[in-house]
Structures are given as C-alpha cells and as structure tokens.
Amino acid sequence: MTTSTPLDQSLLYPSPLKEFWQAFAHNTGALGGLAFMILLVFCALFAPWVAPHDPSEQYRDFLLTPPVWLDGGQWQFLLGTDELGRDLLSRLIHGARLSLLIGLASVVLSLIPGILLGLVAGFFPRLLGPGIMRLMDIMLALPSLLLAVAIVAILGPGLINTIFAIAIVSLPSYVRLTRAAVMGELNRDYVTAAQLAGANLPRLMFVTVLPNCMAPLIVQATLSFSSAILDAAALGFLGLGVQPPTPEWGTMLASARDYIERAWWVVSLPGLAILLSVLAINLMGDGLRDALDPKLKNAQ
Amino acid sequence: MRMSPLCKALLTAGLLTSASFAHANNLVYCSEGSPGGFDPGQYTTGTDFDAASETIFNRLAEFERGGTKAQPSLASSWDISEDGLTYTFHLREGVKFHSTDYFKPTRDFNADDVLFTYQRMLDRNHPFRQAYPSEFPYFTDMGLDKNIAKIEKTDDMTVVFTLNAVDAAFVQNLAMSFAAIHSAEYADQLLKAGKAAEINQKPIGTGPFVFSRYQKDAVIRFKGNTQYWAPEQVKIDNLIFSINTDASVRAQKLRAGECHVTLNPRPADLQSLQADKNLNVPTEPGYNVGYIAYNVTRAPFDKREVRQALDMAVNKAAIIDAVYQGAGQLAVNGMPPTQWSYDESIKDAAYDPEKAKELLKAAGVKEGTEITLWAMPVQRPYNPNARLMAEMLQNDWAKVGIKARIVSYEWGEYIKRAHAGEHDAMLIGWTGDNGDPDNWLGTLYGCASVDGNNFSKWCDSEYDKLVVAAKRVTDQEQRSELYRQAQVVLKREVPITPIAHSTVYQPMRSSVKGFQISPFGRNSFIGVSND
Amino acid sequence: MLSFIARRLGLLIPTFFGVTLLTFALIRLIPGDPVEVMMGERRVDPEMHAQAMERLGLNKPLYQQYFDYIGQLASGNLGESLRSRESVWNEFLTLFPATVELALAALLFAGTLGLIAGVVAALKRGTPLDHGVMSIALTGYSMPIFWWGLLLIMFFSVGLGWTPVSGRIDLLYDIPPVTGFMLIDTLLSDEPGAFVDALRHLILPAIVLGTIPLAVIARMTRSAMLEVLREDYIRTARAKGLSPTRVVFVHGLRNALIPVLTVFGLQVGTLLAGAVLTETIFSWPGIGKWLIEAIGARDYPVVQNGILLIACLVILVNFTVDILYGLANPRIRHQK
C-alpha cells in the first residue's frame, strides 16, 4: 500500500440522510417526541398484545375503579376502569391506534389531493390556478370546526367520516403551500433546463419540481397530523366523532365527562393522552422543520 | 359625592367575594336551552313550554300541580253532553291580561280570547294567520284540528266546543301547554300595527309571570304578575331563567348558588347533589318509558321467538345500575305504572341468556347473526345515555350469539330514518303528553301510528281493536279493562322491550319551597317561593 | 397601490359568491328537514309538513331557492330563523358582542403574555428560561382546549370557588343590554359590583380561548425577535451606546411586531369562529354555539347567513392583513 489514491471528496460530505439525522438528533425535544411516538406506534401496532384486557370487556363489578395508586385501586386495572367497568389502560392503548389512524389517514387523504391541486394551480397560473385558489379561499373563509361539523352531519358520524371531514378541512393549507413552493421553483434554472431537455409535463411536475417542494410539505404534514388528532377529539367531544364503544380518546373524554367529579381519572387520562401525543408530534415537527430547512427555522 | 359606576364597582369589589347573595324574592332557574319563541302553539318541546306556557299563559283547563288530572283554570267549570260530543266551558270572571310597555289591556279576559286562540289554530285562513303564517304541530298531532267541528261563543263568558268523534281525553288535551290562551285584543293591536310576528317575541297572557326580557342563549326575565287571578299563588317577584345547555354546568351552578332550581341532572351527578346540605333533590317516579323497538318488518325480528329471546337476554338490572345510576325503575309494560289502567299483574320475562339461546336456535337464527342497534345521539328524559345503553345491550346480546352493530345518526336524521324503518332494533322512548292511556298504548304501538311513532312497525289486529275501542268510550272503568287486555297482548307479542322508567330528580336549593315535580316534565313556578 | 387594492377587492367577489353557494349546498346536503327535527319522537302530520315547507319556501326547486336567497341578500335581508322566527341579523347582533368580548379578552391575554414570553425567551436564548418558556408554549399549542377548560372549571370554579362556573354575569344583576358588551353595559348600569362580577366571569373562558393564540404569539415573537436582533441597525443602535432596554423595546420589538401582527390578525378570524368549544363549555352565549345548534336544528337561514357573516369577517380581516403586508412589502404588491 504505497500508492495513495486521491481522497474522494464526496465521501467526506455526509449523506443527506445522515446530515438530517445529525440536525434532528441535536434537538432534545424532538428526540423526546420521537421516543414517545415510537412507544405510541408500538402500542398501536401491538395493541391486542400490549393491552392487559379487551378494551370493550365490561367488568360490571368494577365500575369506576380508581387507578392503582389511589384508595380502592386494583392491580388488575392499572389506570382504573370507566363507567362500564372497562379497563382504562387497555382503552387508551387501543385508542392510540385510532388516533394515529385518524391522523395518518386524514393527512394522506388531504396531502395527495392537496399536492395535486397545488401542482396544477402552480403550473397553470392563468388557466386553472385562479379557480382552484378561489375555491381554497372559500374553504378557508369558513370556520374549520363548523365546516367539519357540517360535513359530519352530511356523512353521518363515524370513524371514516371523521377522517374525511378532517381531511377536507385541512386541504386548503396543502394546496396553498404546494402552489407557493411550485411558483417559487418554476423560475429556477434547473426547471428551465429540464424543460429544454424535453421533459414532459408529468415528469416536470412530479420528478423535477415536487421533490424540491417537499420540505415545507413534510413540516405541514406533521403539524396537521397533530391537529387532526385534536380535531377528531373535538368532534368526538361534540358527540359527532367516532362512535362508542370504539375507544377513541375524544369520544372517551366526552362520554366520561359526566363522571368528572366522581372519577377524575376517566376524564383526565384520555385528555392527557391526547395532550402528550399531540405534544410529541409537535416536538418532532419542530425538529423536522429545523433539520429539513434551516431557512424555515424562524418562520412559524 | 357622586361616584362613577366604575368607582363604585371597584369599591364594592373587595366586599364581594361571591356574587351569589340571597335575594328574598328572586328565583333563578337554570334551564336547558333557548326557547324557540313565546307563542306556545307553534312549538313542541318542554324548553319552549316552560319558558312561555307555564309562566306567561294559562289554559282553559290545567293539570293539577304534580299530577295528571285536568282541573279548572281559565274555565271555572265545564259540562259534557250525554253523547260526549259537546263541551260547554264557563269562563272565569275578572281575569286580567298582562299590562306591559308594549300592551295595555282595556278589558278582562272573555270568550273572544278563547275563540281567537282556537280559531287561529283551526283555520288556515284566519286573518291573523294570513298576516303571520304559522303551523300548530302539537295541536295537529293530538288530532284536534280534525276532531273539533266547531267552536261558538254563546255569551261573553261561555264557549261551546263541538266534536266530530268522542275523545275521552279531550279536556286533558286542552290542558296541554300548547293550548295557551292569547289575548284577542292584543292580537288586533298587532294586526293593525302590521306587527303580527311580535306575538312570538312579545307575548301577552294571563299567567302568573309577566314577560320582561329575553337574551338568546343567556337569560329570560319575568316579573311576578301582581294582578294574577289567584294572587296567593305568585310568590316570586323576579323569575329568571338562566340558559345552560350542559347538564354538568347546571349542576355546578346550582351548587355554587348561581341558580336555585334546575332540571334533568345527569345520573352521575346525583350522588354529589344529594350529599350537598344546601340542596334538596326531590324525586318522583317518571312518567315515561325508555324501550327497545324491534322492527318487525325485517328479519329476524319478524319472528316472535327472536324478539322473545333478545328480550330475555337483556340484563335490565345492570342497565338501570350503569345507565340510570339507579335513578330508574325497571319497566315491564309499554307505559309507566303511574298511568291509570296499568296492569300490575303482568310479569317481566326473567333474565335468562341460556333459554334465549335455545329460542334463537329453535327459530333457526345462526350464531353470529348481525343486526343493527340504533342509539340516539342525545340525552332524553327517558334515557340519559342511549349510547352507553347500546354498548351494554351489545354486550348482552353477544352472549347469546347476536352481533349488534351500534348505529347512530344526528338526532334529526335518526328520527327520519327510523320513521322510514331502516333500523333492525332501536332505542327510543316517550314521555306522556296528556295523562291518558291512549297516549301510550295507541300512540306508540297502534296500527294508526305505523308510519309515525310506532317504531316497531307492529300492527296486530287483536291489539289494535282493543285500543281503538277504548278511545271511543268515556267510562274510565270500561276503558281500563280494555287497556289491561291490550297490555297483555303487547307483552305476549314483544314488539318492544321496555327497559326503564327514569325517575325524575329535580335538584334545588333548600331555600326553594312549594315546588312540585310535574309528571309531564314541565317546570312551573306557580306557588313556588324562595326564602 | 390603488390598483393592488382594487385587484384584491376584485378577488373578494367570487369568494363571496362561492361562500354563499357552499353554505347553501352544505346545509341542504344534510339529511332531514327543520320540521322533522322539531317534532322529535312525534309523528309528523304530512299535511302540516307540506304547509310548513311551503311557508318556509323549501318546497321550491333548489336553484330557485338559491336565487331567492341571493335576491334576499341583495336587498340586504338576511332572512329569519326558522325556529325562533326572529331575524337572523337581530340574533347575530345579540350574540356577536359576547363572542367579540370573549375573543378580545382572549387576545389581550394572549397578546400581552405572548409578547412578554417571546421577548424574554429571545433575549435569554439558549438558557433554561428560554427552554422552559418555549416548552410551556408548545404544550399550550398542543392542548385539547375543551379538556383544558373542564380542568380549569373543576379546579378554580368547583374546587376553589374563585371564579363563577359559567355565563357572563350573575343574573341577579339586571343589566339592560345597551351595547351587548357586558363590561361596558355593567359600567353604564348603576349596579355596584356588576362590572367586577362580569370580569370574574370572563377570566376563565378568556384564558382557555387564549391558550393556543398565546402559544402561537410567544413562538412567533421569539423567532421574529431573534431575526431582528441580528440585523445591522440593532448592532448600530447598540454601538451608538443606547441603553439595552431601549434597543430591545424601541428598535427591536417595534420591528419584530410586523410579522407578529400578521399572525395576530390571522388569529382574530380563528378566534371569532373557533370559540365554539369554549362557548359550549362555559355556556357563553356567542355565535359559535348558535351556529352549531342551528346546524342541528336545520335552521337553514341561520346557518347560511351566520356562516356568511363570519366568513365575510374572516375575509375582511385577511384582506386587511394582505393590504398591510402589501404596504410593507412592495414585491408582493407587484406580483400578479
């Protein structure tokens, strides 16, 4: 080994993924959020095995049993039971499933059409853009919770319809964001180059431009993931969300509300679960934003 | 020295730690919601009636306080003809309409006021209705629009009603809240001023309280009627309705002394309300029934055995414990035991999942058969928490191999779809209107209501003959006998599973005296004082 | 500049019509009709039903109903509530001040506290204080506010008895509604103690409603402040030897306020409309609750026009923010 090969400079430069991770890991809050999310996802995926009881099994001799550390608590019900004697811990664990499902599904359901509409609006600023943007303005002018309530009233309450309502309500922000990002990118040289190279429209949209607009979209997606959980809980609280006995956190909170004075845990714990998971996602969102795009660091 | 209000406010701030000081003659009632308006004939809900009919107005006859019997009010007496078709009402002398800043009466109450009130509801072309089109749904619903042939005044203080068919509950119907007597003189004034619509916003009646001011979703204020025809009955100077839609909020306000009387507490709050030394929580057996209606037009509920099986698979005692928190009475028949003609001898089928399984097997219903179980999305007087009840039923029925899927719609749609018969089994119920057995056995389970309140869509000729016959007789003994027979058929055929009669609790401060719980769920403050 | 405003105004017209069409369509897509909802468990007499639908103009074809509605709007008539038969405009006027009062109180709370927290966090950047303040802000931002409201009521009203449970004022005070703003009306009335009582009623709802805006404003202020503090003119000001307080508050905060105000403006719309949950929990007689109940009762005119009024408000606020932004930033002004 006498001949020294010249060092490949590109090897020294950290891969984008690694760079991203370094920036992300620098942020303790984001790491904490991530850890909590991993726990939550684990619970959600393996709910039937993690949960000590069936979430809808009614132990009618143990109505409103307090958590184990209080007087009258039982080791078999760590976090106590609800008004029908169902194990609260198991319901919270299964509830994680629903909340994540609602968050994920509604994000996907609004992200995809949102990006499509945004791309179209950005690429055809004269033809289709104004129409699409006016439509989004109209939707934004309506108070989102009211709009969601109206949509649920039309479709009927339930898990799927809750997801739809939330997805529709969060659509405009994706469209606006995508359009703004696309408009910004369209004047760049690399786009002109791709155009000159003969890239067709779909290629230009999805391969050339879109990947460069992803950073703000990913940040927005995490934010709307957390607000979807909050919205679903709010709808559940108004009695229009996921229907019992499905253990959705907001619905649990709403139906337990009657017992707030007798059994604080049935109200406090689902609320705490909502708060913690939303907080975890928001922490991650902050971390993502800082890591993905330092420019956005100071923006809201 | 004159102080600015702000100064005064700041000075007194230190003195007032809690603003709930005792006012001898005021009573704050925490009510459930905003009334639609103050013209009771147009409305159907208790909230509307409590706010207008029970305070501002009187009716010809009125239900005795705390009972279901009709007694004289604006009519001091009445005679019924032999054939039961003619009712002659003798009106009370010296009754004064309210005098307010928007109306000053020049004469006392007389037959013209009765005529105006009823003609407006009967006649679509009535001049007032031309000026202010409106419908009178409760009047129509009780069949009065079809059954009243004519109304005449024979002299200033006498009115004669002629009916098309015998209606044993006629006077009871006139005692219902929607039949509030308006002032014909005020109506004329409104018509002339071209402001007929104000009858719904600025009411004038003869009742114990005079309307003062209403702010939507916040407050209704009334003053005690100093000229009331039974002056000893008006013991409150200022009656204030504080509007709070949420039951927990109402309970909390009552405990904090922010109101003196409230209604419909959540079962879960009862314990703590009863434990509070400053409160009284009088109670009465409920004049209601919450039940499961099986849609007999759909399989498998077209088979009686299936209905029987599911009926005996329901653990009613557990439901009363959890859903009603003990504030309910196990229901056996399709109407409450406080209703005359109730058949005490009928026994409930015992809770027996094993036998239920056998019955299902015999009926050829496979294990794992799926049905829908509808649960209403709202709290009703007869069912404080339908979703919770549905979850328990789901559990009970799962034990006998029936998979119930809980379905719920927004309340308006729930009813619409149920009328259309889209359900398999549904939770529903009823609160009595007029104290008559027909209002239960006819209205809820008769053939005539198959497209209406008969949510089982059950039409049994043997049963129907009995209830139709009973309506056309005036003798109470005879009617009771027919209704008892009908109840036997109802129990045998199981179109419904009666679950519970929810007990009525009416929490109030202990300073409130003389309040009587109305079986109809009305909240009336006549004769009530707050010391 | 004028042409910029004109262009923006021009965009409002289709938006306005879009909103009318959307609300009209939405409420009519909800199954069930007002008469049926009102009758509850009761039978609906078909004849009475037909009569009512005719009176309400609901038996006409949909396009006809829509044109009638637009015609009505053009003549400045917002129709009357199907349930109370009171004009929608009057109902709006009695309920709107309550919402505005609550929203302003919430904004005042969120604005003051948020600005202070944001400035402090920016100045102490990287210290535990900064981390603490920002963690609290993020927690506030993640709060399910209906739950938060319930907890506060349980603790402060029921547990400690410090604040009233709900409502705007102790009803034993008979305050005539002059302006509809309880704080002003109590001052106009001669009732001693009423003003303080109204204030006590306002505290908890304002805190609950202000929690999320507080978090947003605190975060925004912090980042805007950090940005500004890096600018040359701050360095210049410091170099000139101005006192640090003066640098921060006169030069720093004033410039940091521009983006903060934008967010502030956007929050106004959200606050007015988004008070539904807070109003429900505190029995606050505002428009959020009014509209939710109207959706339940299929009160078409209330839903249509109530939402339209709010939408107009939101549009106007956004429009103003847009214009202000345009004034500040010529690049936006000249963009097509």
Image: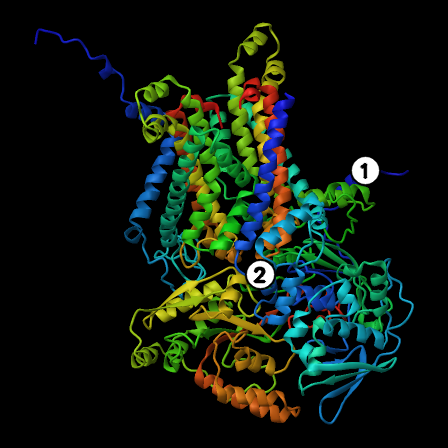
Identified at 37% across, 34% down, the residue is A32
The quadrant of the picture occupied by the N terminus of chain C is top right
List x then y, in percent, for residue B470: 60, 89
Q: Position of residue A33 (x, y in %)?
A: 38, 35
Residue at mark 1 to residue at mark 2: CA–CA distance: 52 Å
Q: Residue furthest top?
A: C240
Classify residue C91 as left or right of residue C133: right
SS class of the residue under badge 1? helix
Q: Is residue C258 above or below residue B304?
A: above
Q: Position of residue C190 (x, y in %)?
A: 83, 45
Please name the residue shown 57% across and 48% down the image: C23
Q: Nearer the viewer, mark 1 or mark 2?
A: 2
Residue A127 lies, with reference to residue C335, above or below; the image says below
Q: Which residue is mark 2?
A: C33
Q: Is residue A98 visible?
A: yes
Mark 1 sits on what residue?
A: B7
Residue at (35% x, 35% y) in the render: A34
Which amino acid, by three-letter code, is at mark 1? Cys
Which three-letter amino acid code belongs to the residue tagged 2? Asp
